[in-house]
Amino acid sequence: MSIIDRCLELYRGDKYYVTYPARPLPQDYWDLKRDPDGKVRDAAAERDTRKEDVRYIAEYINHRAPGTVLDIGFGLGELLEQVENLNTCFGLDPSARAIEIGRERCSAELKQGVLEPGTYANNSFDVVVANHVIEHVDEPVPFVETIFDILKPGGDFICGTPNFASAAARLFQDRFRLLHDPTHVSLFTDDSLIRLFRDCGFRIEQVEYPFFGTRFASPEAFETMIRAEADVSPAFWGSFVTVFARKPE
């Protein structure tokens, strides 16, 4: 059974995710590396593009009343740069390179490490973001439970992750581009992620599938989906899901 078919079985059971064996990176996560299309990328040099990719999250945060924001796995600071003028911001990331670049770009309080119980006090934050993070976490259920605890009542958890029940995943199977990252170890569907959040006590506020209006929406992407002959799937609608969940007051 393929890994995608195993993910589709999440609809029929009580599991939240499928474990995928980790394949260690030969370098720091933020060093130069090849993307699924074989292009060598330098994330630090794509600052403006990466800021645009998370602008919808920044706009959501900035429309809230000003408060305390924690960005877990903050990348290279692209989201924090866009919300720190209106909020008191914190960042947590295991990468020393992320900390170094982040401190050059924003004034948030940055800490190197991973989220564990006790990393932050309960009821500390109005918003916690984990974008492109939960798929890297070996034990995502305690991770979500800890986020629930550190959020204030009425606080928002914003989580984006690959959707392994998407059209591209179903069509391309092992050629789905979001299987390319060797550190993706916990694979969710949109349904199973939402179910996990509700079971942990969250209320779902909205669900987004960022694609239209982004750099990824192109005639080439549609053509590749129609032909389904490429070595790797295109970035496409539904391949990535962002859930906005709230801790009840």
Image: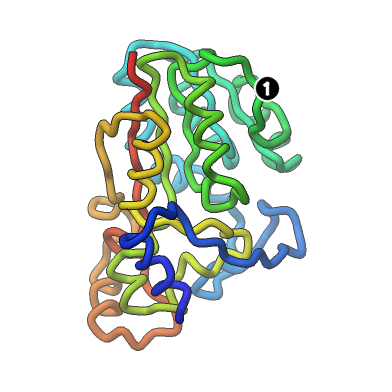
Nearer to the camera, 166 or 32: 166
Residue 13 falls left or right of residue 34: left
Report x, y in % for residue 213: 24, 51
SS for tag 1?
loop
Vertical comparison of 248 with 134: above or below: above
Vertical comparison of 11 with 203: above or below: below
The residue positioned 50% from the left and 68% from the top of the image is 179
* Most distant residue in the front direction: 13
Vertical comparison of 106 with 67: above or below: below
Looking at numbered disc 1 in the image, what kind of residue is underneath it? Answer: Gly
Vertical comparison of 225 with 82: above or below: below
The residue positioned 34% from the left and 44% from the top of the image is 195
Q: Image quarter for residue 20?
A: bottom right
Q: Quadrant of the C terminus?
A: top left
**Scheme of image coloration:** rainbow
The residue positioned 36% from the left and 71% from the top of the image is 169
Report x, y in % for residue 76: 60, 40
Number of residues whose C-alpha sits closer than 10 Å to that of mark 1, classed few (under 14), some (14–19) or many (20 or more): few
Q: Image quarter for residue 140?
A: top right
Report x, y in % for residue 234: 36, 71
Nearer to the camera, 27 or 129: 129
Report x, y in % for residue 151: 48, 20
Residue tagged by mark 1?
A: 118
Residue 130 falls left or right of residue 235: right
Nearer to the camera, 98 or 247: 247
Instruction: Count the marks.
Output: 1
The residue positioned 76% from the left and 40% from the top of the image is 96
Q: Quadrant of the N terminus?
A: bottom left
